[in-house]
Image (tube, coloured by chain):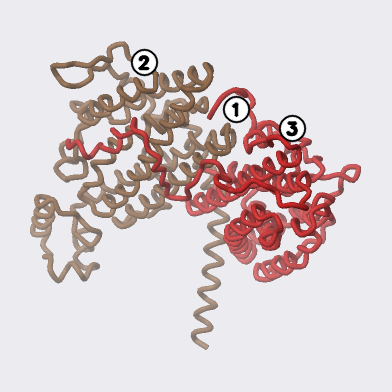
Amino acid sequence: MSEDEFAVYQSLGEESEDHRWAFGTGFTDPLEGVDPSVPPGVDAAALAAYCLMLGDDALIYSHRLQQWMTRLPELEEETALANIALDLLGQARMLLARAGQAEGAASGGTGRGEDQLAFFRDEREFRNVRLAEHLDADFAELTGRLLVFSAWRLALCGRLAASADPVLAAIAAKSARELAYHRDYAAQWVIRLGDGTPLSHRKMQAALEVIWPLAGELFQPDPVAARLPGVAADPADLREEVDGVLGTVLAAATLDRPRAAPLARVAGKAGRDGVHTEAFGYLLAELQSVARAHPDATW
Amino acid sequence: MVAMAAVTEPGVTETAVSAPAELQAHFDRTLERGRRIEPRDWVPDKYRATMIRQIAQHAHSEIIGMQPEGNWITRAPSLRRKAILIAKVQDEAGHGMYLYSAAETLGADRADLTARLISGRQKYSSIFNYPTLSYADVGVIGWLVDGAAICNQVPLCRSSYGPYARAMVRICKEESFHQRQGYELLLTMMGGTAAQRAMVQDAANRFWWPSLMMFGPPDDQSPNTAQSMAWGIKRHTNDELRQRFVDMTVPQADKLGVTLPDPELRWNDERGHYDFGPVDWDEFMAVVKGSGPCNAERIARRKAADDDGAWVRAAAAAHAAKHKAAGHAEGAA
């Protein structure tokens, strides 16, 4: 047995920063080396709230995809959806970190870190849209929901790439490249399922009927975005682009556009106001359980 | 099988010979010279069957191995650790894919191998039938389980079967990063709170003995070892590799500040190795035979994914067939 065969194992106790991975790198501080300042004239508190809501969308959506791991129809889908979950988690980390920086700038102190924001806020403090927290009943809901979400988020990030906040602009530009892949992946599956067998067609159409009511919230006017001219995007502006993409995909998939009405709000409030679905409490309980059981721990 | 190799592989018939005795002699010479067997080469039926079984069981282990660690992804206590764990579990799916592909070069079929896994006709590494009970288990699996896997697998980079050997080079490289990440998590936790240190010790207590079992039964109870070593698909005996693992791991446990749960574990100057206590082979056999703490649920999960995905795979096939037919029609017009 030669020594060099086991060199890798033996070097375990030595210090090394050589963490290369098959898929993706860079797991340390998500905004390392980035100038944290908020540009003059930008409402820092509003910027913090805006980054938080977009970060929450990605964090919670990623969680729902993580729950699918080891349960997917093929190994290719395991790697693809893990990849998408990892991309969204990466977006969440950068956006929450930016939210913390802006929060610090607004208060003149130090803002919260990504883990403080992810693990130590309560349900009503989360600002994600309800579409992000939906629990997919089957693979048709998974792909249909991913198509709507990624088409919308790609349209959004495409606009935010020109944001007056350079950090948000850079995050959005990176995210847009990832989301183009997510949208393409989802679209291909919606088409395969819609135009596959009679059974898959029925399931895909039924999935769209479930998801459609949740899409309305994506385009509603948002008071936080309204406080950030030149920095944020107006949600209403995204509808035409997203509708166009969805129309093209549904036509290729031989599916009908659902006519379902948007899900009603609760006393005028929805996800962006911290009013979520019943399923969300369980999601957060799972996400936060270990971190909250050991609040003084370092991981 | 003999005739098929000679007839359906035109590249082989030119240079190679058609009589089984001469094919066998050619195969033996290839192994003697330490050369690799490639998919186009004639191989004895038993070599093919053994190789398919070895690669398939390795692939199954990667896929089933996603479950115990995947159990902690949604509860990972920091976003950085969550990203690391997702990437690791994703790597395991990738390893499974290229191992199934390597098995397919020998004439196997992924769907058929999956059916054999689900029906219990093919096994996977029995370590994955143990439960993961705290976040420290993620680190200990990286350190001990991936560590034992590396000890088992590094020699397989020199396997006589080319596609497997090449897959192993890539897999071992990635496994070593997984192991490093696991060890780094444990170092961090040991520097944290008393509860975290207790968690690490508890995880090490639970995974130490099953890790030693990963090398298989003792040499005097391992009937296939001699044939596998002659064929160059196994390079060291189970006991050699187990000893090697213990010798490398004890200093790492010391550095962590973890006590390995074996009162007989001590350095033997005369042998130049660590002595260690007896492994509970009854427990090992019980787990291998299906009575492990998680055997039923691991297979049930894999089966559910396969069953629930059947309509999706059927839809993808139907869609592809429609478009192939449409393509042909266009070409004809």
Residue wearing tag 3: A122
Q: Upstream in the sequence, badge 1 or badge 3?
A: 3
Residue most extreme to the right? A267
The brown one among the chains is B
Coordinates of residue B188 in the picture (x, y in percent): 47, 27
Residue placed under numbered mark 2 in the picture? B261
A73 relative to B191, above or below: below
Name the mark on residue A129: none
The kind of residue tagged 1 is Val
The alpha-carbon separation of the residues under discs 1 and 2 comes to 26 Å
Q: Is residue B40 above or below residue B309?
A: below
Count neighbours of disc 2 (C-alpha within 10 A) and say few if under 14, some if 14 to 19, many if 20 or more. some
The CA span between labels 1 and 3 is 15 Å
Labels 1 and 3 in the same subunit:
yes
> How many neighbours does mark 1 have within 10 angstroms: few (below 14), some (14-19), or many (20 or more)?
many
**Image colour assigned to chain A:** red
Q: Nearer the viewer, mark 3 or mark 2?
A: 3
Give the secondary structure at mark 3.
loop
Question: Which residue is pictured at 40% across the width and 24% down the height?
Answer: B207
Residue furthest to the bottom in view is: B333
Pointer 1 chain: A
* Crowd tier of the residue under label 3, counting other residues whose Cα lies within 10 Å: few below 14, some 14–19, many 20 or above: some
| Residue named by callout 1 | A290
Q: Report whether B328 appears left or right of A18.
A: right
- Identify the residue shown where x is 14% and y is 71%: B14
Q: Residue sitting at 74 percent across and 56 percent down?
A: A231
How far from the left and from the top, in percent, is residue B99?
Answer: 35, 50
